[in-house]
Image: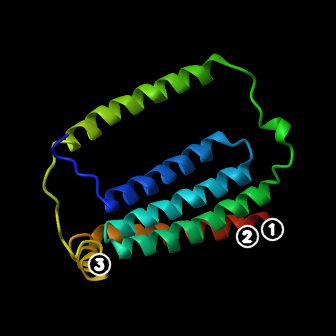
Amino acid sequence: MEGLKITPELMLFGGIAGLAALGAVGVVAFRSAVRSALCLVINFFMLAFLYFTLNAEMLGITQIVVYTGAIMVLFLFVIMLLNLSAPQLLFEKKDVKIGAGMLMGMALFGLVASQVLLPLKDITTTRSNDAFGAPEPVGRALFTMYAWPFEVASILLLIGIVGSILLAKRKI
């Protein structure tokens, strides 16, 4: 392979990506909901570190604050609220669907790897854009090109909050 040079940055990126993939596998592999949630926290942190290695500090910090902080607190709250202390209810019987799902998952992984990884080996140039992921270009794009979708998303979130408050009040 002439086009691919193994550098320390590439090794760091590959190691972090491998840990993120292991965390993602742990989310679906563990039977305990708490362990799955902790693997999801590891996955979120590794994705943030991947953003940091790509010089996208704004996206990395956003990943940590929004997903690892807020979303995972919500997930853990729901897990505790559901009180999944009866693990016998979560176990499934041996079924053909599990093996078929694993086989289809491996086939899908092979297809994605062949379509993504094989074309990457021919790339020789690197893109150096120091402003990628910095707060100024993200804010400029968010409030110019994506101002309408941003406002629509904020209105939908506000409607969801008001709706959840109304549903919670109705039950009390």
The label on residue 17 is none
Which of the two residues, 171 or 35, is positioned nearer the viewer here? 35
Relative to residue 151, is residue 76 depicted above or below? above
Q: Tell whether 34 sits left or right of 132.
A: right
Identity of the amino acid at label 2? Lys
Q: Is residue 50 left or right of residue 147?
A: right
Confirm or deny contact between disc 3 and disc 1 (CB under 8 A): no
Q: Name above or below for residue 40 compared with residue 88.
A: below
- The residue shown at (61%, 47%) is 27
Q: CA distance from mark 2 to mark 3?
A: 42 Å
Residue of label 2: 169
Earlier along the polypeptide chain: callout 3 or callout 1? 3
Residue neighbourhood size for the residue with mark 3, other residues' Cα within 10 Å, grouped as few (<14), some (14–19), many (≥20): some
| Looking at the image, residue 34 lies above or below residue 100 | below
Which amino acid, mark 1? Answer: Ile
Mark closer to the observer (2, 3): 3
- The dot on residue 134 is 3
Q: Which residue is mark 1?
A: 172
Which quadrant would the C terminus be assigned to in this image? bottom right
Report how far apart the C-alphas of labels 3 and 1 lie in the structure. 45 Å
Task: Name the side, left or right, on which 112 lies relative to 123.
Answer: right
Q: Give the image location of residue 56, x and y in percent.
A: 33, 71
Q: Quadrant of the N terminus?
A: top left
Nearer the viewer's eye, disc 3 or disc 1? 3
Q: What secondary structure is found at the residue carrying circle 1?
A: loop
Tag count in the figure?
3
Q: Are marks 2 and 3 in contact (CB under 8 Å)?
A: no
